[in-house]
Amino acid sequence: MKIHEYQAKGLLRAAGVPVPQSQVAFTADEARAAAQKLIAETGIEVVVVKSQIHAGGRGKGRFKEHPDLGGVKVVKGADAAAEIAEKMLGSTLVTIQTGEEGKKVGRVLIEQGMDIASELYLAATLDRDTGRVMIMASSEGGMDIEEVAESHPEKILKSSVDPAFGMQGFDARAVAYGLGLEGKTARKMASFLGKIVTAYNDLDCSMLEINPLVVTGGGDVMALDAKVQFDDNALYRHKDVEALRDETEEDPAELEAGKWGLSYVALDGTIGCMVNGAGLAMATMDIIKYFGSEPANFLDVGGGATEERVTAAFKIICKDPNLKGILVNIFGGIMKCDTIANGVVGAVKQIGLEVPLVVRLEGTNVELGKEILANSGLKITSADSLRDAAQKIVEMTK
Ligand code: ADP
Ligand code: MG
């Protein structure tokens, strides 16, 4: 799960990480009030209006409706902040991470303008090779880190955190000095790092990225941007985090699938897949590719492929505008094949079918299952093996 920058900053602030003062706004009037309050409190006229979407690259992005306006705008005064907020809210921001269709902005962050001496990069993530939290830091902040990794890999420092001891002072200082920081700024950076690792662990993050982390003119370090991803499997123990979910940012099909306990990932291909078990789902996608087509999705209906869930899964698959055919590949282990066949027939009768459907069943009561499909009077093609099924659906959708 992802959250907005302002929400991430709220969590970081609560964890003791220094972040600029800011306030979220849903309307231009709220933006003006937030800017007035900020200016009164800080005595600084400069405020930054920041579009809140679940994608980075906002600064360099552009609005479809306002081609000269980027997603992050520095302004002077509350009226100017309100004017920019008015333009951003309801408009569509296109960045390198949103794709061409862009994302609609529904909220903006009004933040104090910072006096930036330098921009650094910091991220905590899980290193799957060592099974440890890995810190990545670079003096090349504010830029696309993939680009830095590509052209100047030596400019990315890495530090692995021992789970038994946490972020050690000497490791943190090594990173700070490695970034070229000195004196009190280096000490502040080391303390910043410790807090980031604690927040990462306490919140069950899978990624926590601060880009840029800035050194201010006064030598302080601050998180100017924050991007957080959470481990979905641990969300059950963070109800407060789950409450931050912004459903308008999520893929509607994936959201619907989540409600039914289906693991669903939308893809670019044309053959919808309904499979039980993640491994079988992967194999099914592979074999579709092998025979020259592309899967429209990954979908694992889980062990209990009941008629209700099969129907829900069908509905989700059929919403895909690129869909040309469906391949159902289910192994009846826990669930018997006749039950699954009834589920498929029931679902097809309920929602209708406009594309070819190939069903491959294997396992307990497979003959009975095939009989049910054959006698259903529906245009369902039975297949005998994974290979046969993939070949048939690819053929039928060519
Ligand atoms: P994104 O990564 O989506 O482009 P950022 O929050 O990193 O958005 O902002 C982009 C750039 O805008 C930053 O690198 C920084 O130079 C500038 N910026 C962002 N917030 C502020 C702020 N509060 N004060 C001054 N400059 C800012
Ligand atoms: Mg950024």
Image (cartoon, helix red, strand yellow):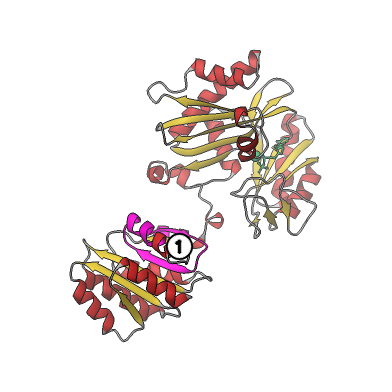
Residue 261 visible in the shown view: no
Secondary structure state at the residue bearing disc 1: strand
Q: Is mark 1 within 8 Å of ligand 1?
A: no
* Residue occupying image coordinates x 50% and y 38%: 207
Relative to 143, does residue 389 appear above or below in the rendering?
Answer: below
* Residue occupying image coordinates x 65% and y 54%: 105
Which one is in front, 104 or 59? 59
Q: Which residues are magenta?
A: 257-285
Measuring from the top left, give residue 76's x and y in whole percent.
81, 39
Measuring from the top left, give residue 128's x and y in whole percent.
42, 36
Residue at the bottom extreme, as displayed: 377
Magenta run includes residue 237: no
* Residue occupying image coordinates x 62% and y 53%: 98
Where ligand 1 lies, by quadrant? top right
Determine whether, in the image, residue 328 is placed left or right of residue 55: left
Residue at the top extreme, as displayed: 183
Which one is in front, 372 or 25? 372
Structural crowding at the residue carrying mark 1, measured as other residues with C-alpha within 10 Å and reported as few (<14), some (14–19) or many (≥20): many
Relative to 324, does residue 334 appear above or below in the rendering?
Answer: above
Residue 33 visible in the shown view: yes
In the rendered structure, which amino acid carries the disc numbered 1? Asn
* Residue occupying image coordinates x 73% and y 40%: 48
Measuring from the top left, give residue 35's x and y in whole percent.
73, 40
Magenta run includes residue 265: yes
Res 284 → quadrant? bottom left
Determine whether, in the image, residue 237 is placed left or right of residue 188: left
Measuring from the top left, give residue 94's x and y in whole percent.
68, 54
Res 67 → quadrant? bottom right
All told, the count of numbered labels is 1
- The residue labelled by disc 1 is 297
